[in-house]
Amino acid sequence: MNDKAQLFLKAEGEAFEGGKYDLRKVDAIISNYRLILDHSLPLVVGRQNLTEHLKSQFVYEVEFRRGSLELLINLVFNHKEALGALSVDGGIQVAEQIAKIIKGVIKFRRAWSKLMDLAEGKGDSQKPGINLNINLNDVTVDNGSTINVNPIIIPAAETTRGAIDRLISSIDGTHLEYVEIRSAESETKLTSKDVAILGTQKQELPSTVDILGRLYEINFASRKGLLTTSTGRVPVTWDESILKDIHQLANKDNIAFTVRPIVDHRRFKDAPIAYHVLRCWQPQHSLGLDKPKRSPRK
């Protein structure tokens, strides 16, 4: 590596032999790697999200190298003056911090998965504790139940989870043996063994609940949205069968919903709850949850 702001990715496996690449494997690697970078970059420069303005400050220049699948990404700064001290060294520290965040996220998720497995083996449903330590440069475990981690790793683990999960899922040990991400000073290697950190999938609970709220930020294509209730915001999904009702009642206050709670055991913070909407309707009384009366049978 030289003194440029660079990140290096390498992937090996049968999918890349003979100079002909498996398009699906290439797409899984490149698209999810880009998402991991997009979610890590704002945290390095002190932002919560990758805004359009921040995106305009950086360009991911990609160089492909022969043999396996190798990507060399150069971080190019369009407006160095907007980034202050972070751009003094040409962005080398930005590249290094991104690489360290990725490494920290993987180490944290490995530790989390191990402790979750140990707890489940004992019949314990308690999640591992998390101790935030701003001076900590590594991920450590105390007393077999508490993970010590830098605060920046937790939001990074949440936002990159989907991309990392998909990247790991594409590593089958044969067609794709491993994926390695590194900078000049930091290195992370993902293999098929890391399938363990994907953890337990979402669990839909058998009971249902009737609640009042407002459905908004709706994506009709993916059937997802947010539901605001008296206790806060909750992500929701629904089936195609009630799509018409969702269309009619979206963005309206005091709509009644029959929902089934979903527990996501993989969440690292906050309540691991979402709702799957089974039914929605306009209550006759704004303060009640009276369901529409059915017409008497003739």
Image: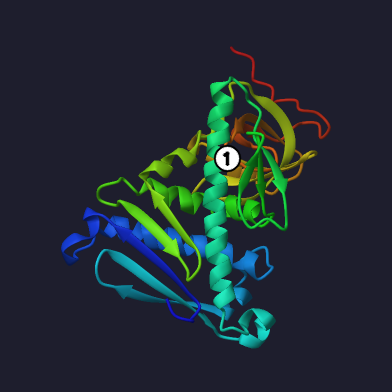
Secondary structure category for the residue under label 1? helix
Going 65% across and 33% down the picture, which residue do you hit? 127
229 in relation to 289, above or below: below
Instruction: Say if residue 220 shows up in the picture.
Output: no
- Name of the residue lying farthest toward the left: 18
Q: Is residue 153 left or right of residue 190?
A: right
- Name of the residue lying farthest toward the right: 287
In the picture, the quarter occupied by the N terminus is bottom left
Going 67% across and 43% down the picture, which residue do you hit? 269
In the picture, the quarter occupied by the C terminus is top right
Instruction: Say if residue 202 shows up in the picture.
Output: yes
Residue closer to the observer: 260 or 38: 38
Q: How is the image coloured?
A: rainbow
Q: Is residue 187 left or right of residue 224?
A: left
Percent across and percent down for residue 121 are 54, 23
Percent across and percent down for residue 63 are 36, 76
Residue closer to the observer: 256 or 64: 64
Percent across and percent down for residue 212 are 75, 35
Label 1 crowd bin: few (<14), some (14–19), many (20+), radius 10 Å = many
60 in relation to 240, above or below: below
- Name of the residue lying farthest toward the top: 298
Going 80% across and 28% down the picture, which residue do you hit? 288
Q: Quadrant of residue 91?
A: bottom right
Q: Is residue 285 left or right of residue 217?
A: right
- Name of the residue lying farthest toward the front: 143
190 in relation to 181, above or below: above
Q: Quadrant of residue 243?
A: top right
Q: Quadrant of residue 119?
A: top right
Question: At label 1, which amino acid type do we have?
Answer: Trp
Q: Which residue is mark 1?
A: 112
Percent across and percent down for residue 71 are 36, 69
Q: Is residue 47 left or right of residue 75?
A: right
